[in-house]
Image: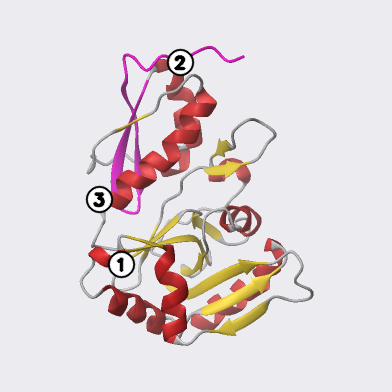
Amino acid sequence: MSPAVEPTDLSVVAHVSAFGVVVPIRASGELSGPVLAAWRDALTDADPTAAAVEAGGPDAETALHHLSPAVTTRAIDARAGDLVMLHAAALADPSTGRTAVMVAASGTGKTTASVTLGKTFAYLTDETAAITPDGIVLPYRKPLSIIDGGHLKKQVAPSELGLLGLDRECRLAALVVIDRDPGHDGEPLVEMLETVDAIAAIAPQSSYLPSMDKPLHRLAELIHLVGGARRVTYAESADLAPVLSELLAAAA
C-alpha cells in the first residue's frame, strides 16, 4: 500500500497550459514528482492566469486522478464565453497543423482514439477542444487516463505514450462526430451532416456554449469554416486513420 500523502505544506510545483490558460498546481513534496511526470507535456514558464488547483489525496494515484478534471474545469471556467469548447479529441497533421476535432461524449472512445492515432497525428487534447472564433485550436496536452489494472485509471503523459507533439499554430480543418460501434462491419461510414443536424449533435457536447454571444451562430460559423461537419461510425480507432488523413489532406 502506498504511504499516505497528507495535504499539508502545499506549494506550487508546476504551471500548466490549458488552451491559453496557465493554471498553477499546488502539491506536497511527496506529490511533486508524480505531478511533474504526468503533466510534463503541458508545463509552461508563463505566469499564472487562473487560481491554483491543489493536488491531494491518500496516495499519488488518487491525487492525479482528481487533478486532471480539476485543472480542466479551472481552464474551462476561465475561457467561458470566449472560446467554443467541445468535449472532443483534437489531432493535427504534423506537417501542416491542420486539425481534426472529434466530438464525442465522455467514455465513448476519445482517449482510445487519441492513443491509437496520436503516433501518426499530433496530439492536442483528448478531453476539451478549445477553438477561437477564427478557427485556431488551442492545445491542452494533458495526461491521458489509461486503464492499467489498478483501482483508478493511470494518468500518463502523452510523450510517455509516444504521442506526437507540435510546436506550431493549429487550425481547425475538420469537425467530426465520432460514433464507435464495435458491431460495425467494414470501413468507417462517413456521413455529411446538415448544419442543423450538426449543431444538434455537437451543441450538447460543449461547455458554456449558452454564455457566448449568439452561441448557435458561433457553432454554425465553425461548421461552415470546415465545409460542414461529418458523422463517422467505426468499429476500432485504428479505422479512423485513413478518414482523418483524407479530411486533413482535403483541407490543406
In this picture, is 128 found above or below 136?
above
Tell me the element at label 3: helix
* Residue where numbered disc 1 is placed: 132
Say the numbered circle drawn on residue 216: none
The reply to whether residue 66 is in sight is: yes
Amino acid at dot 2: Val
Distance, label 2 to label 1, CA atoms, is 39 Å
- For marks 2 and 3, the one nearer the N-term is 2
- Compared to residue 21, the image places residue 39 above or below, namely above
**As shown in the figure, which amino acid type bears the numbered disc 3?**
Ala
Colour scheme employed for the rendering of this structure: secondary structure
* Residue sitting at x 72%, y 63%: 236
Give the mark toward the camera: 1 or 3. Answer: 3
Callout 1: helix, strand or loop? loop
Mark 3 burial class by Cα count in 10 Å: few <14, some 14-19, many 20+:
some
Q: Residue 246: where, in percent of width, then height? A: 61, 79
Please indicate whether residue 179 sits to the left or right of residue 125 in the image: right
Instruction: Give the mark, 2 or 1, whose residue is nearer the N terminus.
Output: 2
Magenta region: 1-27
Residue type (three-letter) at the residue carrying disc 1 = Thr
Q: Quick check: 99 left or right of 52?
A: right
Percent coordinates x, y for residue 238 in the rendering: 70, 63
Q: Earlier in the sequence, mark 1 or mark 3?
A: 3
Q: Is residue 130 left or right of residue 142?
A: left
Q: Which residue is mark 2?
A: 5
The disc at residue 78 is 3
